[in-house]
Image (cartoon, rainbow, N blue to C red):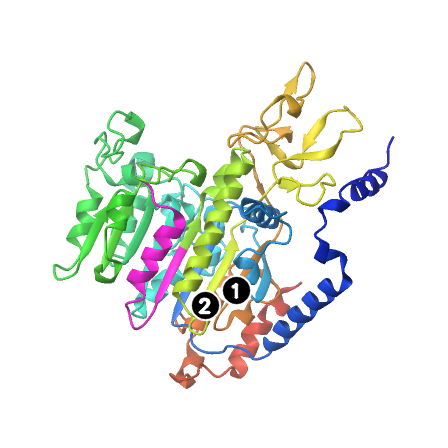
């Protein structure tokens, strides 16, 4: 059997020509390190100002391996080898790790995690905006166990607030910002059991329109959950699956419009053309629902009917930043998760690159002096890439050797489980016989499942702006909104804000020290 280390050595010799000339000079690496060191030393001057604005980017399912692979893809899309490329989130000065488990699950789901990083309380899987005292599907365990989110804290403080997602606006991540539900799947009353309806629980779409009636910006998918049962969709007139779902006969779009003051400029749009025709500086309220369900994958997006995530983020910020008290904006790259579940890494990674574009756009439109930006994930996936690939190898390409067991090639990207498990003639499929670069190619997996699963490892948290240094180590996931609230002087912990000045910010004081050291007290 050939040693993998020998293969690696041979590969290094064969690919030496791929090494950029400047990287062969030790001075290149030393100078780069010294520049990084100088930048790190400047970080000793902490930004302790009050965060006027808070933006949270949530890459659903964006584990560390996804971040790394997306970085390479971003570089390769610009005709570089890829490994040396920097994502926008890579440029953030502070990085932490988040422990993602739910109160009842070692490997979490997106609902319990959303409750943690938006409401500051860990919860059971499948539940949103409620504490762990609420049991999934049990409506009668909801009352009295509701928990509020940082979006609510911001709204109560007089800030403008917004939600932008590539999933349905009533999906797990955004719903934790405004809803309190014993089941994440209660998108409309059509998906609720009779018992829950009889006990008085409301579906998530209903709660979106009623719980916080003055959310300034809502953009994403989920159009069908807003209309009466079987109402024809405006875009897909012949598609029965796109028709309205509501059993109560309500038109939630009309209800949304009725809640807006007549002297304010409110707009409901359902396609990209309508959206881009708006002047965001004159818009007070915006509801954009661009698909009956989730938005299309970025690689499949119709750029006439569906806006990109970065386009939605740009318009959202321009609308929200008019408020002199600032804003809170939740942005979800939600279909990263869906691409991985389908075993289609190419779709997932392009979703990640598009979210990174949106992060860059937000950075241009705001200032690090008064805007805290946090980028993180709710959980990871059983997604990996390896195989001693040479520098610049296509992230979707083959490893440079064949298996020393079945003598077949394999792609660098693989999944621990999922729909990519294929046996042909009693053996593993020969990937050289298929188009493994296709958008919908399902990477091979070790265990056959119709739907690939989440991963349970910690995820990264990237932060910049006021008080970003408080995200600095290994934290429980529910710690994140407490930092955002502290930085913006919203929510329960505002004792430090009395000493804040318009020119400076809250004095660090003992409370800041206590908050920074809090994770050290829960290590055991």
User: Closer to the camera, 296 or 376?
Assistant: 296
Q: Residue furthest front?
A: 21
Instruction: State the separation of the CA atoms marked 1 and 2.
Output: 7 Å
Question: In the structure shown, which secondary structural element does the residue marked by tag 2 occupy?
Answer: strand
Q: Residue at x 29, y 50 (%)?
A: 208
Q: Position of residue 469 (x, y in %)?
A: 55, 71
Q: Position of residue 36 (x, y in %)?
A: 65, 68
370 relative position to 35: left or right? left
Q: Position of residue 431 (x, y in %)?
A: 65, 25
Q: Is residue 132 visible?
A: no
Q: Residue at x 37, y 47 (%)?
A: 181
- Which image quarter: residue 33? bottom right
Up/down of 110 relative to 359, above or below = above
420 relative position to 368: left or right? right
Q: In this picture, which residue range is highlighted in magenta?
A: 305-330
- Which image quarter: residue 362? bottom left
Q: Which residue is mark 2?
A: 372
Q: Quarter holding the C terminus?
A: bottom right
């Amino acid at each position: 059997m050939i040693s993998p280390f020998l293969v690696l050595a041979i590969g290094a010799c064969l690919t030496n020509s791929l090494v950029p000339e400047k990287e062969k000079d030790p001075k290149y690496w030393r100078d780069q390190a010294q520049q990084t060191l100088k930048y790190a030393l400047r970080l000793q001057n902490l930004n302790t100002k009050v965060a006027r604005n808070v933006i949270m980017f949530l890459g659903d399912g964006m584990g560390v391996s996804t971040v790394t692979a997306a970085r390479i893809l971003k570089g390769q899309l610009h005709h570089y080898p890829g490994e040396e490329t920097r994502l926008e989130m890579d440029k953030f000065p502070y990085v932490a790790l988040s422990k993602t488990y739910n109160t009842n699950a070692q490997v979490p789901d997106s609902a319990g995690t959303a409750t943690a990083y938006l409401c500051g309380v860990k919860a059971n899987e499948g539940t949103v905006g409620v504490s762990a005292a609420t049991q999934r599907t049990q409506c009668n365990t909801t009352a009295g166990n509701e928990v509020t989110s940082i979006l609510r804290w911001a709204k109560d403080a007089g800030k403008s607030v917004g939600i932008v997602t590539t999933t349905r606006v009533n999906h797990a991540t955004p719903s934790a910002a405004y809803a309190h539900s014993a089941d994440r799947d209660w998108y409309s009353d059509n998906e609720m059991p009779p018992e829950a309806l009889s006990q008085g629980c409301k579906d998530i779409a209903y709660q979106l329109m009623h719980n916080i009636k003055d959310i300034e910006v809502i953009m994403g998918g989920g159009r069908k959950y807003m209309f009466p049962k079987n109402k024809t969709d405006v875009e897909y007139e012949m598609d029965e699956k796109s028709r309205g779902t509501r059993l109560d006969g309500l038109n939630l779009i009309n209800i949304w419009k009725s809640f807006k003051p007549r002297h304010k400029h409110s707009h409901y749009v359902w396609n990209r053309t309508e959206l881009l025709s708006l002047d965001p500086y004159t818009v007070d309220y915006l509801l954009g629902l661009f698909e009956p369900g989730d938005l299309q994958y970025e690689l499949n997006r119709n750029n006439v009917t569906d806006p990109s995530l970065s386009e939605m983020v740009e318009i959202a910020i321009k609308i929200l930043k008019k408020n002199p008290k600032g804003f809170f904006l939740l942005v979800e790259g939600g279909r990263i998760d869906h691409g991985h579940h389908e075993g289609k890494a190419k779709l997932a990674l392009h979703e990640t690159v598009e979210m990174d574009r949106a992060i860059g756009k937000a950075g241009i439109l705001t200032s690090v002096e008064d805007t805290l930006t946090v980028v993180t994930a709710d959980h990871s996936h059983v997604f990996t890439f390896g195989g001693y690939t040479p520098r610049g190898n296509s992230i979707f390409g083959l490893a440079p050797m064949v298996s020393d067991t079945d003598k077949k090639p394999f792609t660098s990207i693989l999944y621990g489980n999922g729909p990519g498990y294929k046996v042909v003639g009693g053996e593993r499929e020969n990937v050289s016989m298929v188009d493994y670069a296709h958008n919908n190619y399902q990477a091979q997996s070790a265990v056959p499942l119709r739907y690939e699963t989440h991963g349970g490892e910690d995820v990264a948290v990237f932060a910049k702006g006021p008080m970003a240094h408080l995200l600095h180590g290994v934290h429980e996931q529910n710690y994140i909104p407490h930092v955002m609230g502290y930085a913006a002087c919203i929510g329960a912990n505002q004792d430090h804000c009395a000493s804040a000045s318009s020119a400076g910010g809250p004095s660090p004081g003992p409370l800041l020290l206590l908050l920074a050291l809090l994770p050290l007290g829960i290590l055991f």
